[in-house]
Image (cartoon, rainbow, N blue to C red):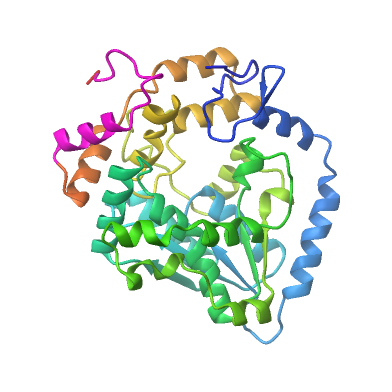
């Protein structure tokens, strides 16, 4: 395993690209330092001017979770650029945190935006999650796709041609060198790459996978939608996004839940079991979400390389409350859960004693 000499990220991330010992994320971060952000903001304003309406109709769609990045997106598009967005939330049925419930309501209230909440059938979610966990180890493979495809299908059905997402994770995390404003190809690629036969083979029904199936081609061609990555236009900085979010009422988990294995209390906090999806990177790829965040903090100058290494040494920890919530909804015993985890453990990365509970 090769590790980045600047941020300590391993080369086991799928699509990871290293040059002279430096990971793609660090290379791309250096590129961003030379960007003319004033020009990028001017480009964003042109998009807003193109789609802003004067008749009260929705100008655009903003997919939101309720997190700090969602607050920043709505702040920029509604408060600064005077758009009238329809917010779309694709939620999971795990136990919500109090902070998560508050934050989604806060977006709805503070910014006075209409909010469309998309909830798939709980049994559909349960069976899709079990299929993904058992067959691929990618716990939330189905709903992670729906987070992008469901708002896009609504966009086409509602005839709203403009939408913004937050960060282009492929560029930010270094699996792509392409810095592009448009997310269309990524989302359409998700529809193309959705393996319909896999899900049908393992027990889902045609009507249960509708959110991930291609939108009506005639409507799509007529609408010609444009979907943007906001990280192309605005420097995507966790501290900045958090400051904006807190200014407008965002709450973290500080007084509610100190998550085992996590170094922060304000990212991916909407539901309790969701973090199992991120933790599964550890047995599969040798790193997990806290390491991702620590490497990014190092890249952006908030912590040192030595501090990243300390986080890396504790990344085996998984929060027991999250495990219990995941097992309760999906119908696993703890023994069944760990047997499935072990099935997907990368034997080249596996530590001799990973059960350190």
Asked whether residue 172 is drawn in magenta, I would say no
Residue 44 on image: x %, y %: 77, 60
The residue drawn where x is 68% and y is 48% is 231
Q: Could you tell whether 252 is left or right of 133 in the image? A: right
Quadrant of the image occupied by residue 19: top right
Quadrant of the image occupied by residue 36: top right
Magenta span: 333-355
Residue 133 on image: x %, y %: 31, 44
Asked whether residue 349 is drawn in magenta, I would say yes
* Residue 348 drawn above or below residue 227: above
* Residue 333 drawn above or below residue 44: above
**How many numbered markers are drawn?**
0
Taking depth in this image into account, of 313 and 341 the one nearest to the observer is 341
Q: Could you tell whether 238 is left or right of 329 in the image? A: right
Residue 12 on image: x %, y %: 52, 26
Taking depth in this image into account, of 66 and 355 the one nearest to the observer is 355
Taking depth in this image into account, of 57 and 240 the one nearest to the observer is 57
Q: Could you tell whether 226 is left or right of 127 in the image? A: right
**Quadrant in which the C terminus appears:** top left
The residue drawn where x is 21% and y is 51% is 329
């Amino acid at each position: 395993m090769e590790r980045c000499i600047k941020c300590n990220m391993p080369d086991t991330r799928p699509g990871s690209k290293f040059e002279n010992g430096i990971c793609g994320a660090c290379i791309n971060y250096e590129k961003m330092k030379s960007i003319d952000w004033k020009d990028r903001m001017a480009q964003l304003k042109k998009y807003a001017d193109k789609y802003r309406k004067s008749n009260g109709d929705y100008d655009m769609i903003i997919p939101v979770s309720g997190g700090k990045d969602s607050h920043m997106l709505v702040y920029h598009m509604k408060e600064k650029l005077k758009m009238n967005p329809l917010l779309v939330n694709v939620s999971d049925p795990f136990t919500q945190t109090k902070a998560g419930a508050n934050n989604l309501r806060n977006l709805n209230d503070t910014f006075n935006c209409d909010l469309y909440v998309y909830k798939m059938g709980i049994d559909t979610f349960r069976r899709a999650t079990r299929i993904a966990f058992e067959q691929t180890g990618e716990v939330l493979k189905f709903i992670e796709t729906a987070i992008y495809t469901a708002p896009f299908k609504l966009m086409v059905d509602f005839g709203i041609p403009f939408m913004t997402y937050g960060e282009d994770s492929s560029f930010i995390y270094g699996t792509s060198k392409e810095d592009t404003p448009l997310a269309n190809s990524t989302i359409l690629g998700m529809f193309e790459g959705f393996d319909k036969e896999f899900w049908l083979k393992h027990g889902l029904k045609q009507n249960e996978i509708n959110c991930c199936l291609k939108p009506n081609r005639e409507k799509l061609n007529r609408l010609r939608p444009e979907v943007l990555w906001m990280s192309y236009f605005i420097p995507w900085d966790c501290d900045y996004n958090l400051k904006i979010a807190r200014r407008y009422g965002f709450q973290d988990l500080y007084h509610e839940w100190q998550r085992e294995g996590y170094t922060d209390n304000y990212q991916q906090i909407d539901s309790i079991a969701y973090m199992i999806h991120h933790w599964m990177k550890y047995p599969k790829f040798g790193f997990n979400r806290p390491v991702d965040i620590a490497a990014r903090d190092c890249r952006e100058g908030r912590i040192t390389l030595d501090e990243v290494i300390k986080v890396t040494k504790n990344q085996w920890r998984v929060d027991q409350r999250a495990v219990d919530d995941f097992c309760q909804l999906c119908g696993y015993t703890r023994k069944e859960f760990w047997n499935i985890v072990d099935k997907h453990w990368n034997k080249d990365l596996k530590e001799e004693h990973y059960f350190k509970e």
